[in-house]
Image (tube, rainbow, N blue to C red):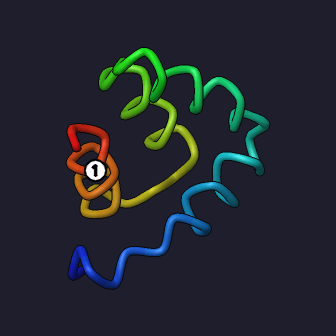
Amino acid sequence: MNENDFEGTLVLEKLAEIGKIEVFWEAIDADDFTKARALMKRAGIDAQTIAVVLKKMVR
């Protein structure tokens, strides 16, 4: 995946399927990379997309 082609909606849809959008936003707000990564893995998001999200969290 090219970072320029990143579509955050897919990540949010996957998190919504497991009912964890609010918890994910809290992890992002707290800069809790471990929790954000764990939630995305639990939602079945692929490793490449997780890496892009974590990289964007740093910015």
Where residue 44 appears, x then y in whole percent? Answer: 51, 52
- Quarter holding the N terminus? bottom left
Q: Residue furthest front?
A: 59
Determine which quarter of the picture holds residue 32.
Answer: top left
Q: Nearer the viewer, residue 9 or 46?
A: 9
- Quarter holding the C terminus? top left
Where residue 18 appears, x then y in whole percent? Answer: 74, 41
Where residue 45 appears, x then y in whole percent? Answer: 46, 56
- For the point 71% across and 29% down, the residue is 22
Q: How many marks do you count on the picture?
A: 1
As drawn, is 13 to the left or to the right of 30?
right
Where residue 33 appears, x then y in whole percent? Answer: 31, 25
Q: Nearer the viewer, residue 55 or 38?
A: 55
Q: To which residue does mark 1 refer?
A: 56
Say above or below: 25 vs 49: above
- For the point 48% across and 23% down, the residue is 29
Task: Classify 10 Å Cα crowding around label 1: few (below 14), some (14-19), many (20 and above).
Answer: few
Please name the amino acid that badge 1 sits on: Lys
- For the point 23% across and 52% down, the residue is 51
Say above or below: 39 vs 46: above
- For the point 51% across and 33% down, the residue is 39
SS at mark 1?
A: helix
